[in-house]
Amino acid sequence: MKPLAEYLLIKQKEKAYPPLLKEIPDPPSQIYLKGKIPDYRKKAVAIVGTRKATGYGLKTARELARDLAGQGIIIVSGLALGIDAEAHKGALDAGGLTLAVLGSGINQIYPATNQPLAKKIIDQGGALISEFEPNHPPEKWTFPQRNRIVAGLCQMTVVVEAPERSGALITAYLALEYNREVGAIPGEITSVNSRGTNELIKKGAALVRNADDILEILGLNPKDGKFDKLDKIEKIILECLKNQKNKDELLIKTQLPVSLLNQKLSQLELKGIISNKGGLYYL
């Protein structure tokens, strides 16, 4: 493993190379990684789809990624516009980890509008991954080629929205070739963006409604790990919520600054650990 400026060059024979990626028929001989090397013992799920997503698709991708990341699942996608970007954002919302597999070199973020998102992925402990030289520009052929890495890194690939001819479907079919799990979000039968996903389900892909469906397919209990990564402040808040309380009561009990309490309450809601109904918070 060779450090190069702000990134790492990891060869296939090295320990830091993703073990699942070694199992595919044509793994890259080396990868460039910018950010933190992930814990490969954790489960990883690819969430992919069209760049021209509907509001339904964008919302679904973000919520699905958020809920999975809140359970400790690593979210993998391609940093493209649309579904990919929302999947990364959902993982970040939950304070989780996400990996972006690029169809260009890691110094050539594409699209350029996603540069702030790429930075946030790294800042939050995730990583950018590419098999291309760091300054390699994006080209038409590089995106289908990187899809095998997206599928190869994960135990499961989920397609949220995809028309009949879509790179996301390439990723799904590659995942099937690699003997990995494949799921799809169902959509309206008249929607162009749901033709690909509905066809996947027709051909035997798992019908995915929510994160619990994915956790079940992966053999995980939806409750497993939910409380494992809580910090000290979050645990104090939960201790106070053995009986439901409003925010004023929580401020008095916890003695936390308002801004910090608001931040932690939002994070606990995103992780699905607490709920807020009519101004009252409860487990």
Image (cartoon, grey):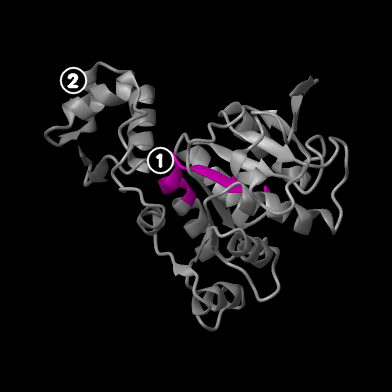
Report the disc number at residue 60.
none
Location of residue 101 in the rendering, given as x and y in whole percent from the top left corner: 69, 45
Identify which residue is drawn at 70% across, 64% down: 167
Q: Position of residue 43 (x, y in %)?
A: 48, 43
Where residue 239 appears, as percent x and y from the top left, is 18, 26
Residue 165 lies in the magenta-colored region: no
Residue 68 painted magenta = yes
**Amino acid residing under circle 1:** Gly
When asked about the image quadrant of residue 125, the answer is: top right
Position of 64 with respect to 145 (left or right) is left
Q: Is residue 80 visible?
A: no
Looking at the rendering, the stretch of residues picked out in magenta corresponds to 65-79
Query: Residue sitting at 45 percent across and 52 percent down?
Result: 63
Determine the CA span between mark 2 and mark 1.
26 Å
Q: Position of residue 246 (x, y in %)?
A: 19, 34
Q: Looking at the rendering, in which quadrant would you find the N terminus?
A: top right
Asked if residue 181 can be seen in this view, the reply is yes
Residue corresponding to mark 2: 253
| Left or right position of 59 against 48 | left
Image quarter hosting the C terminus: top left
Question: Which residue is tagged 1?
Answer: 70
Relative placement, left or right, of 215 versus 159 is left
